[in-house]
Amino acid sequence: MANIKSQIKRIRTNEIARQRNKSVKSSLKTSIRRFREAADTGDRDAALTALRTASRELDKAASKGVIHANQAANKKSAMASRAAAL
């Protein structure tokens, strides 16, 4: 454990940020998985709804710095092209 007061505070802050990032990434993976499952079944309406939800979560995660903006754009593009193929 650190002895320096500011480092003790940083450790606490980093742990809070790590847990928040973990939560955001987990919900992001879930929403992307829901889109993939809907696309696999061929249900166009469910897939489009899931695409909208996943796109919003990707944008939020990118704006908060949890994931890189290019990664969010790449995932959104892949999902949109898959939805267009339905």
Image (cartoon, rainbow, N blue to C red):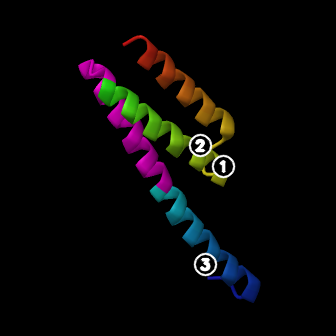
**30 magenta-colored:** yes
Q: Residue at x 56, y 23 (%)?
A: 77
Q: Residue at x 63, y 74 (%)?
A: 13
Q: Residue at x 73, y 89 (%)?
A: 5
**18 magenta-colored:** no
Q: Dots 3 and 1: beta carbons under 8 Å?
A: no
* Whether residue 62 is situated above or below residue 37 in the rendered picture: below
Q: Disc 3 vs disc 1: which is toward the camera? A: 1
| Residue 22, position as x, y percentages in the image | 48, 57
User: Please, what is the three-letter code of the amino acid marked with disc 2?
Assistant: Asp
User: Please, what is the three-letter code of the amino acid marked with disc 1?
Assistant: Ser
Mark 3 or mark 2: whose residue is earlier in sequence: 3
Say which residue label 2 marks: 59
Say which residue label 3 marks: 12
Location of the N terminus (image quadrant)? bottom right
Q: Disc 3 vs disc 2: which is toward the camera? A: 2
User: Please, what is the three-letter code of the amino acid marked with disc 3?
Assistant: Arg
Q: Residue pushed farthest top?
A: 85
Q: Dots 1 and 2: beta carbons under 8 Å?
A: yes
